[in-house]
Amino acid sequence: MKARTWLVCLALVLLTVLPLWLATAPPAAPGGEAPAIFTGADNRAQQAIVAIAPGYKPWFTPVFEPASEEIASLLFALQAAIGAGVIGYWLGMSVARERARREAASPQDRRAD
C-alpha cells in the first residue's frame, strides 16, 4: 500500500478512537439519578421551552408515539440505514453510469475477424 493510503487509514482510526478516548462522563444529577448521556435535541428543546415559558402548551401531538425508548431508537436507526442505502445506491449508479459513458466515448480497438 502507498504511504498516502496508510496515512488515510491512520487518520480514520484516530478520528474514530480519539473522541471515545478523550470523552468524559457528565457529572451525576443532584437527585442521584444517572445522567442522560444520549439525550436528543428534542428533550433539550423541551427543557429549554419549559424554562423560558412554563405555561406553554404544545399546539399538536405526535401522529405516532413509540411504545418505548428502545423502539424509538430502533426506528431512528432503521431510518438512517434506509437513507444510507438510498445514498449508496445513488452513488453506485452514478459511478457506474459515468464509467459506462467514458467507455462508450473512448475509441475501442475492435478488429473485424
Image (cartoon, grey):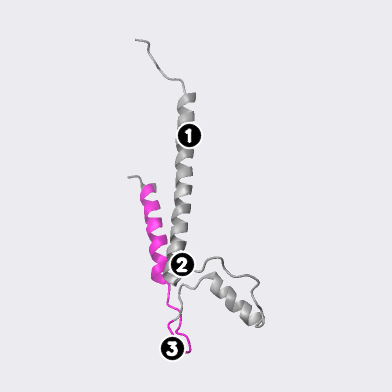
Place residue 13 in its image quadrant: bottom left
Q: Earlier in the sequence, mark 3 or mark 1?
A: 3
Q: Tell me residue 1's x, y (percent).
A: 32, 45
- Marks 3 and 1, how far apart at CA: 58 Å
Q: Say which residue appears at 34% left-offset and 10% top-offset.
A: 113
Residue behind mark 1: 97
Q: Height in image: 62 above or below 25?
A: above
Place residue 21 in its image quadrant: bottom left
Residue behind mark 3: 32
Q: Is residue 40 part of the magenta span, yes or no?
A: no
Amino acid identity at mark 3: Gly
User: Which secondary structure class fits the magenta region best?
Assistant: helix
Give the residues drawn in magenta, as a range. Answer: 5-34
Amino acid identity at mark 2: Ala
Q: Mark 1 packing: few (<14 Cα in 10 Å), some, or many (20+)? A: few
Q: Secondary structure at mark 3?
A: loop
- Marks 3 and 2, how far apart at CA: 26 Å
Can you tell which mark lies on residue 72? 2
Residue sitting at the far top:
113
Q: Secondary structure at mark 2?
A: helix
Q: Height in image: 10 above or below 88?
A: below
